[in-house]
Image (cartoon, coloured by chain):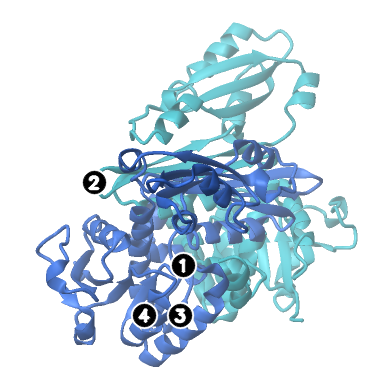
Chain colours: A cyan, B blue
Amino acid sequence: MTAKIRIGIVGYGNLGRGVESAIAQNPDMALVAVFTRRDPASVALLDSGIPVVGLDVIADYRDKVDVMILCGGSKSDLPEQGPKMASLFTTVDSFDTHARIPEYFAAVDAAATKGGNVALISVGWDPGLFSLNRLFGEAILPQGETYTFWGKGVSQGHSDAIRRIPGVKAAVQYTVPLQSAVERVRSGTQPVLSTREKHRRDCFVVLQEGADADAVRNAIVTMPDYFADYDTTVAFITEDELAHDHSGMPHGGFVIRSGKTGRNTVQTIEYSLALESNPEFTSSVLVAYARAACRMRRQGQKGARSVYDVAPGLLSPKSAEELRKALL
Amino acid sequence: MTAKIRIGIVGYGNLGRGVESAIAQNPDMALVAVFTRRDPASVALLDSGIPVVGLDVIADYRDKVDVMILCGGSKSDLPEQGPKMASLFTTVDSFDTHARIPEYFAAVDAAATKGGNVALISVGWDPGLFSLNRLFGEAILPQGETYTFWGKGVSQGHSDAIRRIPGVKAAVQYTVPLQSAVERVRSGTQPVLSTREKHRRDCFVVLQEGADADAVRNAIVTMPDYFADYDTTVAFITEDELAHDHSGMPHGGFVIRSGKTGRNTVQTIEYSLALESNPEFTSSVLVAYARAACRMRRQGQKGARSVYDVAPGLLSPKSAEELRKALL
C-alpha cells in the first residue's frame, strides 16, 4: 500500500466543490485542505472534517500537499494564481481562454521550472478531452475535417452577456448543437458549415419590472459575436421558473473527425459527452490528471505540460501491467 | 526541415496495403521497403517504385529503417515475428489476441530492451483506441460501468468458424450491436446486459452443391462460444451475391462509460467509430503510432510499450507549441 496522493484545492466554488466530491471517489487520494481568499470560517465544505485555510498561508503546506488543484476562473484568478502556485506546488488547472493559452503556458512554465514542479494546464473537457480527440482525429486521419459541436449546455459567457443588458434581471443561455449538422457530418461528406448551421442559442430571460421585452429581445439577437451570427430564441420567464427549470449546469458536445483513407474510403471517429453537471465532470477530469501530475513530478519532470504530454496510463490508479491485462 | 521518418512494412496483406496508403498521406514519412516471406517478384505494391525485399535479408536494413510496422496476423505471425523484429528494429504491431497480451508483451519487451529498441504492441482500434477510451472512462468516472459494443462489422474469426462447417463453400459474418442496448446504456441506468442483449450475429452463407441447408443452419446457431449465446440469423446466398454485396470490410463500434459524480449526477462519455474499411483504419492508427515510436526511441526509451504509455502529442507531426496553439 503506497501513501495516498495528498491534494489541496485552491478556490471553493462549483469547481472546488466538484473536486472535493471527486477525490472521495478515488481511494488512492486524500484531500488535505481547501485554500480560500475568503474568511475560512465562512466556507462550509461538503466534508466538515477537512480544514479550510487562508490562501495567505498556503506556502506552509509545501511539504504537506503533493498536488494543488486550482479551481479559480480563467479570466482573473488563474493568470495570477497559476504562475504563483506553480512556483510552490505541482498544480493542475482548467485554464480555458483558448486564445491566451500560449502566453499562460509560458508564464506557468517559467514558474514551475524554477520551482521544480509540474504544472498541468488547461485540463477539463474543452480544453482537455475534446482537445485530445481533435489531435487523435487529425493524426490518424490526416485527410479529413474535424468538427466540434457544443451542448446542449449552459454557456456562462453568453448568459453573462445577456445579464449586462439593461432591463434584464437574470438569464440563462443554452448552446444547442443542430442535429441536422451533426447528421451531415456523420454522413462523411465533410460539409462546410456556417456558424448558424452548427448551433442554435436558446435564451431564458427574467425581466426587471417595467422593462421593455421587445427592446431586450432585440438587444440579444443583434449582439455581435455572441448572438448575431446564430438563430437565437428568447423566452421570458419568471424568477421562479428560472430557479426551478434552469438551475442545473448540463453540458456536453461532440468532436467528430470525418476522414478518408485508401481510395475514397470514409472513416468516422466520434467522441461525445452528455453531462448532467459540467463543473462536476470537469472536476473529475482535474482529479484524474492530478494523479498523473504527481507521477510526472516523481519521475523527475518539471515545467508546464498540457494533456498532450500525459501518457494515458498515468491517469489510472492501476499499474501498467494491470492495465495491459485488464483493459488493453 | 527534419529528415523523414523511414518506415518498413513487414507482411503485405490487407493491413500492409493499408499502411502503404496511409504513409502516402503523411508527408513526414517515407516508405523504404516492404518485406515479405513470399517471392518478392510475386508481390505487387500500390506504388511500384517501392522495393519489395525478402524477409531473410531484413537485418541489412537496420540503418535504413527507423520503424518497422508489423502487418502479420496475431495467431501465428506475430508471436514469432514480434520479438525477432523488436531485437533488430523499433516496431509497431497490432497484436490483438487480448488474452495473450501479457505473455506477448514480456517476450517483445525482452527482445526490444536487449536490442535497444522501442516496440509498441497492440496498436489499432481494439486493442488500441477503444482500450484508451476504456481507461479514460474509468479513470475520470471511477463510479460507473464501461460498455464496449462492436459493429456493424465483419468478424473474421466467426466467418472462419462458419467456413469450417461441412457443406459451406464461403461465408461472411457480421457482428451487429443492438440499438436497444446502446440506448439503455446511454440513458444512464447502468444496465446489466447479457451477451444476447448486446449483439446479434448475421451470417451470409454460400452452400456447396448438394449441402443440407437446415443442417448447416443448425450447426451455426448451436455452435458454442461463437453463436449459441446470440440471436443469430442465417441467410443463404449465391457466390455472386457474396462477391457483390459482402466484399467490403466495414467495422466500428462504441465504448460508453456511464458514471456518476456528486450526488447521483449522471455523466456519459461515448467514443464511436464508423469504418468503411477496418484494415485501412487500423493501418492509419499504426502509422500515427509509428511516428510516436520513432520519437520515443530518439528520446532514449527502450523496451515494449502499449498505447497507454504514449503521450498523445507524440502522434502528431505538429510541435508541442503548435498543438497548444491550434488544437488545445
Q: Residue shown at 61%/35% (left/top)?
A: A156
- The circle drawn on residue A263 is 2
Q: Chain of mark 4?
A: B
Marks 1 and 2, how far apart in space? 30 Å
Which residue is situated farthest in the right direction here?
A: A48
The chain containing the residue under callout 3 comes to B
From the image, state whether disc 3 or disc 4 is nearer to you. Answer: 4
Q: Position of residue B314 (x, y in %)?
A: 39, 66
- Residue B200: x percent and y percent? 58, 43
Return the residue at label 1.
B311
**Same chain shared by disc 4 and disc 1:** yes
Q: Nearer the viewer, mark 4 or mark 1?
A: 4
Amino acid identity at mark 1: Ala
| Dot label at residue B304 | 3
The answer to which image quadrant residue B282 occupies is bottom left
Q: Is residue A266 left or right of residue B52?
A: right
Three-letter code, disc 4:
Gln
Q: What is the CA distance from the residue labelled 3 to the residue labelled 1? A: 15 Å
Mark toward the start of the polypeptide (3 vs 1): 3
Marks 3 and 2, how far apart at CA: 33 Å
